[in-house]
Amino acid sequence: AIGGALAPVLARRGKVDIINLTAWQGEHDVVLRYNGGRDAASLAVLKVQIDNRDGNNVKTTLYSPEIGKEYRFPYIGVVNPNTINVVGVFDDGTEQTVMMKYF
């Protein structure tokens, strides 16, 4: 999903996996919400990287993400994200970019 819209991405195996994510910048954090989607049952992991304008980045792995849950990435000081890139890992081991958003 790019910018929160459903966006199928062609995976290596030729199958299209569809999940839905939204992300936004809060007053003191960046929030990633996992909304489910057609292939939610086969999603095992979300690998998240937030690149900030000051050159720092945040990387984390969310195991067994929960539909409807908001994952918060708090900041100390100025919230300055440039991009968020999320890679989904599915039950069959396929990894694909499921979100790339510029703030």
Image (cartoon, helix red, strand yellow):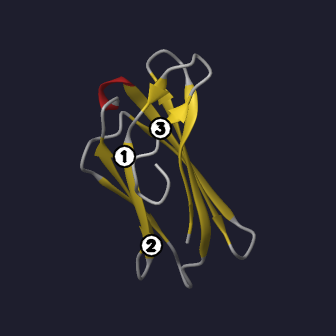
Point out the frontmost of discs 3 and 2.
3
Assign a secondary structure to mark 2: strand
Q: Residue at x 57, y 26 (%)?
A: 11
Point out the tag, 1 or 2, that comes first from the N-terminus. Answer: 1
Disc 1 versus disc 3: distance between alpha carbons? 10 Å
Disc 1 versus disc 2: distance between alpha carbons? 20 Å
Few, some or many C-alpha atoms within 10 Å of disc 2 (few <14, some 14-19, many ≥20)? some
Give the amino acid type for the residue marked by disc 3 in the picture: Pro
Disc 3 versus disc 2: distance between alpha carbons? 27 Å
Q: Position of residue 2 (x, y in %)?
A: 50, 54
Q: Residue at x 71, y 67 (%)?
A: 56
Contact between marks 1 and 3 (CB within 8 A): the answer is no
Point out the tag, 1 or 3, that comes first from the N-terminus. Answer: 3
Mark seen at residue 29: 2
Point out the frontmost of discs 1 and 2.
1
For the C terminus, the image quarter is bottom right
Q: Position of residue 74 (x, y in %)?
A: 46, 69
Assign a secondary structure to mark 3: loop
Give the amino acid type for the residue marked by disc 1 in the picture: Asn
Q: Position of residue 67 (x, y in %)?
A: 26, 43
Residue at mark 3: 8
Mark seen at residue 88: none
Residue at mark 1: 20
Give the amino acid type for the residue marked by disc 2 in the picture: Asp
Assign a secondary structure to mark 1: strand
Point out the tag, 3 or 2, that comes first from the N-terminus. Answer: 3
